[in-house]
Amino acid sequence: MKNDRTGLRGSLLPRRCERMKGKGMDASVTRFHDMDFILIPGGATLIGSSAECPYPFDMFHGFPSQTVDIASFYLAKYPVTNLDFMRFAAENPSFEFRCEPGTEEEPVVELDFQTVKSFCDWAGVRLPSELEWEKAARGPKGFTYPWGDEFLPNACCCHCTSPCKVGLHPLDVSGYGCHDMAGNVRELTSSKFLAYPNSPSAGRDIDQSSAYVVRGGCWSDECDELLLTNRSFVELQQRDRRVGFRCVLDYPIQTPAPG
């Protein structure tokens, strides 16, 4: 059975790393472990919201708007899918995993942090930091949504009863080419759930030492929950059917020395 994103569905073995370079640094794509990675160019980056902070010590919105320097990195074009995770489970029998027929191309969900880390270690990748995720999602123009600054109904997978196949919504694509950044599933990051940089909450962090930042909206969210500056969290051992993840390759990619 042909699969338009990962080749033959019957093949569970990871493929070699391939480079597919387009025009300009941000058009460079690398294929690794049957996942496409897009180069996000480093430099000065707009993060946070310029809107008024609704609560004195709000930790669930990115305030204030500011510019930070973020190094170049590769981010996966899509969230990790059930099919991607099946490849991992096939080589790691201690991780039992099954998905419903027909959901192979939907994002994998309900994984705790350690399981996600085990997948990343196996694939030779890592989770994005909170600010790397925001940079990739907002694109070079720093939009509020992947497609612009105004919410568009039906632009992404939201107001639904379950996730959908990745890449199904052509408007839910950031300026760098990363799909499903606003909807479908919220995405786990490697960042601990602390106050947003330079926010009114800085220095007043609640004890969330076992919690990690989750960014983006999901299939069940309302439009006001899809802002790319919104943030939430999951506990270390929490499994949430609204939360998936995508991966990062460090730039430049380290090629093993011959022999």
Image (spheres, rainbow, N blue to C red):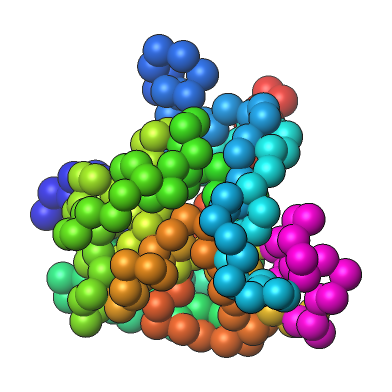
| Quarter of the figure with residue 165 | bottom left
Identify the residue at the far left of this view.
1
Q: Position of residue 220 (x, y in %)?
A: 30, 78
Look at the picture and state if 131 lies above or below 84: above
Query: Quarter holding the N terminus?
Result: bottom left
Q: Which quarter of the figure is the C terminus placed in?
A: top right
Q: Residue at x 75, y 56 (%)?
A: 197
- Say which quarter of the image contains residue 57: bottom right
What's the magenta bit mostly, secondary-structure-wise?
Answer: loop
> Residue, x 23% and y 54% (percent of image)?
152
Q: Is residue 4 left or right of residue 132?
A: left
Residue 244, horizontal then vertical, whole percent: 45, 69
Residue 140 seen by the camera: yes
Please tell me whether residue 138 is drawn above or below residue 205 in the rendered image.
Answer: above
Marker count (numbered): 0
* Residue span colored magenta: 191-208
Whole-percent x, y for residue 14 in the image:
43, 49
Relative to the observer, which residue lies in front, 240 or 175?
Answer: 175
Image position, residue 36 (x, y; %): 40, 40
- Relative to 208, does residue 92 appear above or below in the rendering? above
Residue 85 figure quarter: bottom left
In the shown orientation, is residue 206 left or right of residue 31? right
- Residue for point 34% across, 54% down: 180
Magenta-span inclusion, residue 167 = no
